Image (tube, rainbow, N blue to C red):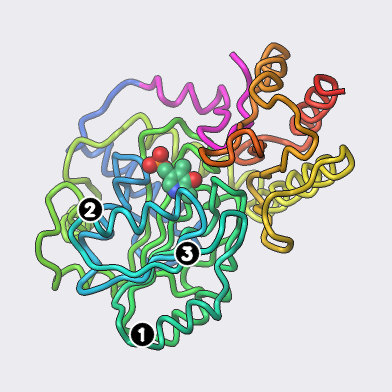
């Protein structure tokens, strides 16, 4: 099996995989309550928030759809800069809600001025942002955009942080993020199948006013069950064991050290790309810290290179959809180390020389 350097799912350490093999417990048992109440404060710490952090047995898209159904009242503003952020816009429409979109070209970031101009119209009750656009390797300026969002206290600010949460510091309370969501197969380095999301009082109050929230993703039900340290349906208990263990490992490493490690891997990968005659796909200053999207300026056969590197025991990612052969992507998130990223880049250099 090749070690994964794709932008999700990411490499899962043996120690974590062992957690998934633990004997099962009932989800209405005292043991589960204990597990739930162990995990909750640890997640709050990683997200720098006093808001409740809910566990959802789904991938991130499930929570996104739920968030739209619970939060968008009249109209949302959706910030689109690639294929993942485009899901906000698509889902708002599919959920039968109204939304407007600010869209920039792939590789470009959303700028706070664009957001300010639209929000000042007073037309919106919800703002939807994707922090790290995984298809283009662009990291949007979350802090600047959150400063704008704060000027509109009636707007609920929702952030898809799927490919950045726990790899990059997201100070949820300081930034005033009302709903901050991620699935766990990216920077958390767990297998896919579980998502987490923080939810502010403002978001919970809003959801009370919104009809047709559905059942499985009804935020009011997440709240009701949270108060009992429980979940509405049978959750992915093995994943929650693994998450608990992973959170402990994060604190052992030191959460700041974890963020720094991601930064080091990003700096290294960008430098390797430039030194080897490639260029970076994202506009300068907005490059992702958790994955690097590289322009295939040398015209290498991306699919072929991936296969050859895979024979050496490592797998990196191709470009996403429209930019499939024009770019390739190296994921450097989760538990991967600088040494491992170095090993991968050496293997790529070897194959393409
Ligand atoms: C991977 C990803 C998603 C989709 O997550 P799932 O867990 O597959 O639903 C959504 N948004 C971003 C930014 C992602 O990177």
**What whole-number distance in Å separates the C-alpha atoms at marks 2 and 1?**
26 Å
Residue at 82% of width from left, 23% of height from top?
352
The foreground one among 238 and 272 is 272
Q: Is mark 1 within 8 Å of ligand 1?
A: no
- Disc assigned to residue 94: 2
- Give the vertical position of 329 relative to 96 (above or below): above
Q: In the rendered image, which quarter is residue 25 located in?
A: top left
How many residues crowd around disc 3 within 10 Å: few (fewer than 14), some, or many (20 or more)? some
Residue at 36% of width from left, 71% of height from top?
77
- The percent coordinates of residue 113 (x first, y second) are 55, 81
Contact (Cβ within 8 Å) of mark 2 with mark 1:
no
Q: Quadrant of ligand 1?
A: top left
Contact (Cβ within 8 Å) of mark 3 with mark 1:
no
The foreground one among 264 and 78 is 78
Decide if residue 40 is on the left or right side of residue 291. Answer: left
Specify start and end residues of the magenta stretch as a single range. Answer: 1-22
How many residues crowd around disc 2 within 10 Å: few (fewer than 14), some, or many (20 or more)? few
Decide if residue 33 is on the left or right side of residue 326. Answer: left
Q: Which of the two discs, 3 and 1, labels the residue nearer the N terminus?
A: 3
- The percent coordinates of residue 63 (x first, y second) are 31, 50
């Amino acid at each position: 099996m090749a070690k994964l350097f794709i932008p999700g799912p990411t490499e899962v350490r043996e120690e974590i995989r062992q957690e998934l093999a633990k004997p099962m417990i009932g989800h209405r048992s005292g043991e589960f309550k204990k597990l739930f109440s162990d995990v909750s404060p640890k997640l709050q710490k990683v997200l720098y928030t006093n808001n409740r952090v809910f566990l959802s047995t789904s991938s991130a898209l499930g929570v996104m759809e739920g968030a739209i159904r619970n939060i968008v009242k009249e109209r949302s503003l959706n910030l689109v800069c690639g294929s993942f952020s485009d899901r906000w816009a698509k889902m708002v429409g599919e959920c039968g809600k109204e939304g407007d979109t600010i869209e920039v070209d792939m590789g470009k970031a959303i700028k706070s001025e664009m957001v300010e101009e639209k929000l000042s119209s007073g037309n919106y009750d919800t703002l939807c942002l994707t922090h790290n656009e995984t298809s283009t390797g662009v990291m949007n300026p979350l802090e600047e955009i959150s400063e704008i969002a704060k000027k509109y206290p009636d707007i609920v600010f929702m952030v898809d942080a799927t490919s950045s949460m726990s790899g990059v510091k997201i100070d949820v309370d300081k930034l005033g993020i009302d709903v901050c969501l991620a699935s766990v197969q990216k920077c958390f380095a767990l297998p896919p199948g579980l998502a987490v999301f923080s939810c502010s009082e403002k978001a919970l109050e809003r959801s009370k006013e919104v009809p047709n929230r559905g059942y499985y993703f009804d935020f009011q039900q997440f709240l009701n069950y949270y108060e009992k340290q429980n979940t509405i349906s049978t959750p992915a208990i093995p994943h929650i064991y693994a998450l608990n263990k992973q959170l402990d490992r994060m604190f052992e490493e030191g959460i700041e050290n974890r963020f720094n490690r991601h930064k080091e891997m990003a700096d290294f990968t960008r430098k390797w790309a430039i030194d080897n005659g490639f260029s970076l796909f994202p506009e300068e200053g907005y490059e992702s810290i958790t994955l690097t999207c590289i322009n295939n300026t040398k015209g290498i056969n991306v699919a072929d290179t991936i296969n050859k590197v895979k024979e050496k025991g490592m797998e990196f990612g191709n470009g996403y959809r429209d930019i499939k052969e024009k770019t390739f992507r190296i994921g450097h998130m989760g538990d991967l180390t600088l040494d491992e990223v170095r090993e991968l880049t050496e293997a790529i250099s070897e194959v393409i020389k």
